[in-house]
Amino acid sequence: MFWQLPEREIIPTLEELGIGLVPFSPLGKGFLTGAVKRGQTFGADDFRSKVPRFEQENIAKNMVLVDFVNEIAQRKQCTPAQVALSWLMAQKPWIVAIPGSTSWGHQTENFAAADISYTDEEMREINRRLSEITLSGHRYNADSQKNIDSGY
């Protein structure tokens, strides 16, 4: 949900070749859980302090996604993290989300995402609404992006 490029460019090729996908940071480095708030800053030792998408101005603009995830969570009577994970798993059976967790409680919450299902109509509506959301800020700073682009 926090990076939609794979749906358009990568997933069709993976499906054609019969290759599975383990998405990196399926909870958007905490953003999709609702843990990141407007006006939040990060310490120098926090990776997100160097990521443009987590600059205060971009956090504020990107809250439209968090608000949407919260809306789904209320409807499905689950947590925002469970929405992000269950939506991801509902895309294709060969997508396996492996979220990082800082506590056993988070891990238990993440496991429960496997019990959440969506109708075809719900998935169409969610995906339509997601396609209308444009996120602000690059996913990585310029130095990190150079390493990614060069294959490191």
Image (tube, rainbow, N blue to C red):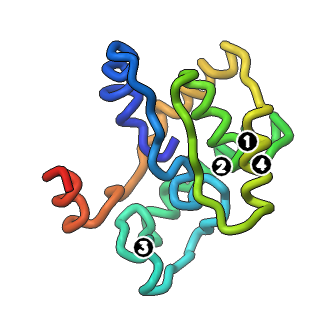
Mark 2 vs mark 4, CA separation in Å: 12 Å
Q: Residue furthest right?
A: 77
Give the residue type at disc 2.
Asp
Ranked by sequence position, the earlier of labels 3 and 2 is 3
122 lies above or below 77: above
Which numbered circle lies on residue 107?
none
Q: Is residue 109 left or right of residue 149?
A: right
**Disc 4 residue crowd, few under 14, some 14–19, many 20+, Cα 10 Å:** many
Mark 3 vs mark 1, CA separation in Å: 28 Å
Q: Is residue 38 visible?
A: yes
Q: Nearer the viewer, mark 3 or mark 4?
A: 3
Q: Nearer the viewer, mark 3 or mark 1?
A: 3
**Which picture quadrant has residue 111?**
top right
Which numbered circle lies on residue 67?
2
48 lies above or below 113: below
Give the residue type at disc 1.
Glu
Residue topped by disc 3 = 47
Give the residue type at disc 4.
Thr
Tell me if label 1 and label 2 are in contact, CB under 8 Å.
Answer: yes
| Residue 119 in the image, given as x and y percentages of width and height | 72, 16
Q: Secondary structure at mark 2?
A: helix
